[in-house]
């Protein structure tokens, strides 16, 4: 099981819907995956650990870019 001090855990996946309402958290964890997508095992891990699936949009970003975009959206409550 994944455990860490946090208010929310977000798992970014191009196949999932994003959360549309703004929100804020003091501490959040954001997982961004490889350009080739998550493996079935990784998706199962996220599901089992009740991570919130979010989307950065339909575009597949490079790993470095996805991290920056996810952090920006997370800071402004847009995930």
Image (cartoon, rainbow, N blue to C red):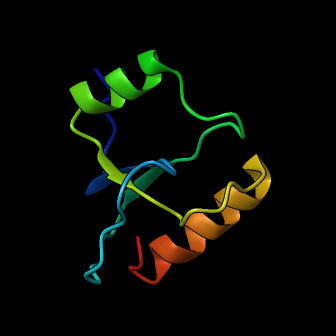
Q: Is residue 27 above or below residue 49?
A: below
Q: Residue at x 28, y 55 (%)?
A: 8
Q: Is residue 60 above or below residue 35?
A: below
Position of the N terminus, as image quadrant, is top left
**Which of 19 and 7 lies nearest the eye of the viewer?**
19
Q: Position of residue 61 (x, y in %)?
A: 72, 56
In front of the other: 25 or 62: 62
Above or below for 16 versus 1 = below
- Left or right: 74 with respect to 44? right
Q: Image point 38% across, 79% down: which residue? A: 77
Comparing 25 with 11, the one in front is 11
Position of residue 63 measured from the top left corner of the image (x, y, whole percent): 74, 47
Indicate left or right for 78 with 19 as reference: right
Image quadrant in which you'd find residue 25: bottom left
Residue, far top? 41
Q: Is residue 8 left or right of residue 39?
A: left
User: Relative to 52, is 21 above or below?
Assistant: below
The spot of residue 34 in percent (x, y) is 68, 36
Q: Residue at x 36, y 61 (%)?
A: 27
Left or right: residue 10 versus residue 56 is: left
| Quadrant position of residue 70 | bottom right
**Quadrant in which the C terminus appears:** bottom left
């Amino acid at each position: 099981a994944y455990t860490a001090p946090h208010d929310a855990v977000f798992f970014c996946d191009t196949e999932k819907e994003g959360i549309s309402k703004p929100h804020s958290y003091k501490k959040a964890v954001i997982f961004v995956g490889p350009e080739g997508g998550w493996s079935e095992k990784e998706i199962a891990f996220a599901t089992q650990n009740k991570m919130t699936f979010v989307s950065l949009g339909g575009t597949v970003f490079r790993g470095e870019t996805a991290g920056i975009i996810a952090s920006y959206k997370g800071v402004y409550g847009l995930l």
